[in-house]
Structures are given as structure tokens and as C-alpha cells.
Image (cartoon, grey):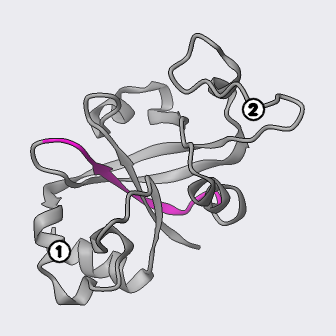
Amino acid sequence: MRYWLMKSEPGAFSIDDLASRPGQTEPWDGVRNYQARNMMRDEMKVGDPVFFYHSNCEVPGIVGIARIAREAYPDHTAFDPQHIHYDSGSDPANPRWLMVDVQFERKLKRTIPLSELKDRPELGGFALVRRGNRLSVMPVTQAQWEFILGLE
């Protein structure tokens, strides 16, 4: 089992949106970074826990927990010219972009803000707190996962 953090802007898709979906499950589409895609394709497995992170908002931070419900498969939004995530170079016969399904598990008791995570020396190696890291999908070690849950 691996641990993950996935970022979403709450104005586009929030933890509450995930909780309100049928089966509390939703495809995680729109990933357009090769490194993030490769992690989704090669490393994410059904059952892996995910920190749900709200980004680009007043208080960015970890707001909940989800699980991987379906392993990587072609992201159909890349083929739709009317969709915001359309990629004219993506071919349905050889898809460039993938998505996974995530399922809501629970909201945290409180948002754990990025500012607090950055202040914790125990998280110095955590990809989220490293300067310049803008990936929307990133791995979390088991030790980081447990430490962060302890902050709840």
C-alpha cells in the first residue's frame, strides 16, 4: 500500500463535492503532468489512502481522506474539444492522459493548513512543503501520513 496527496481547488471540486457524488466516488480527471500521470499509472492501487488537499484558496490545506477506488484508465476529457481538459495531441488509440477514481472516506476534524505543515521539521522531506513543488498528485510516506493524522 502507498499513501498519496491529491490537490484540488475547492471552487472546481471540493471534498464536499466528492462526498455528495453517487457512491461518494468520482474520476480524478484533468491531470496534465507526466510525472503525476506516471505515479497514477504505475504506483496507485485500489485501496491506497489519499489526503484530499484544497489548493488555491484562502486557507490551503489537507481537508479529508479518500481512497483509490479504481486504478488508472484513459482520461476521456482529453478527447473532448468542448472540455476544459482537452488535449488535441491525445489520441484515444494511444491515450496520453489517465485518471483514477477516488472515493470519499471522511473529512478531517479540522483543516490542517499548509502553513502549519511547513512549520513542522518532521515534514521537511515532504514533497508538499518543498519550495517550487506544484504537482497535483504526490506520494506521502507512511511516517508522514501518521504524523499528519496526529495533527488532526
Q: Which residue is mark 2?
A: 90
1 or 2: mark nearer the eye = 2
- CB atoms of marks 1 and 2 within 8 Å: no
Q: Which residue is mark 1?
A: 118
Q: Which mark is residue 15?
A: none
| Foreground residue among 68 and 78 | 78
Q: Is residue 141 left or right of residue 151?
A: right
Q: Is residue 67 above or below residue 92?
A: below
Of helix, strand and loop, which one carries label 1? helix
Of helix, strand and loop, which one carries label 2? loop
Q: Is residue 107 left or right of residue 69?
A: left
Q: Residues within 10 Å of mark 2 (few under 14, many from 20)?
A: some
Q: Residues within 10 Å of mark 1 (few under 14, many from 20)?
A: some
Could you tell me the amino acid type at mark 2? Answer: Ser
Distance in Å between CA atoms under marks 1 and 2: 37 Å
Q: Residue at x 26, y 81 (%)?
A: 147
Could you tell me the amino acid type at mark 1? Answer: Lys
Sequence-wise, the earlier of marks 1 and 2 is 2
Query: Image quadrant for the N terminus?
Result: bottom right
Q: Is residue 16 above or below residue 149?
A: above
Q: Residue at x 54, y 43 (%)?
A: 31
Q: Is residue 54 magenta?
A: yes
Q: Position of residue 139 (x, y in %)?
A: 48, 70
| Foreground residue among 3 and 132 | 132
Q: Is residue 44 left or right of residue 14?
A: right
| Foreground residue among 133 and 115 | 133
Q: Is residue 74 left or right of residue 51?
A: right
Q: Position of residue 6 (x, y in %)?
A: 42, 53
Q: Which residues are magenta?
A: 45-57
Q: Position of residue 72 (x, y in %)?
A: 69, 48
